[in-house]
Image (spheres, grey):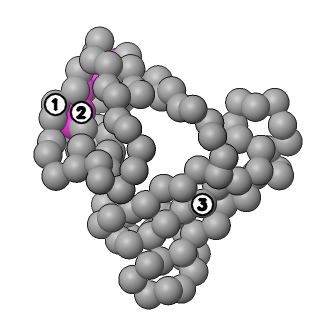
Amino acid sequence: MFFILEGTGTLRYADKYYPVKPGDVICCPPGPEAPHQLVNTSDKELKYLAVSTMEEPEVAEYPDTGKVGVMAGSPPGSGGDPSKRTVYLFNKKSSGGVDYYWEGES
């Protein structure tokens, strides 16, 4: 869930795009059927609060590039040791590892 605090931008939800502004509350269920992305499309900062279930492991698919990220260990905000959080990245299209998390993402 996202709470837009300041600025404007665009929510990409599945294959549709929606403008966002301060005061908007956005709920995006997890799963590959509805990938979602917030993009700052203005010349000012887009500030938002993201709320999550913090369930482990967290698995995120990036449909534009075929990457999958699996995060496990100590989730942010849990009070655990952040150095014990591990991120595994791989590319479904090439079946190889990915060196950089945002590599190839627009």
Residue type, label 1: Pro
Residue type, label 2: Gly
Question: How much space separates mark 1 and mark 3, taking CA atoms?
Answer: 29 Å
Look at mark 2 in the image and give the residue it sits on: 9
Residue type, label 3: Val
Q: Is residue 34 visible?
A: yes
Q: Is residue 86 above or below residue 10?
A: below
Look at mark 1 in the image and give the residue it sits on: 19
10 Å neighbourhood of mark 3: few (<14), some, or many (≥20)?
some
10 Å neighbourhood of mark 2: few (<14), some, or many (≥20)?
many
Question: How much space separates mark 2 and mark 3, taking CA atoms?
Answer: 27 Å
Q: Residue 70 carries which label?
A: 3
Question: Left or right: 29 with respect to 22?
Answer: right
Residue 3 placed where, x, y %?
Answer: 38, 20
Q: Is residue 37 above or below residue 68?
A: above
Of residues 103 and 95, the one nearer the viewer is 95
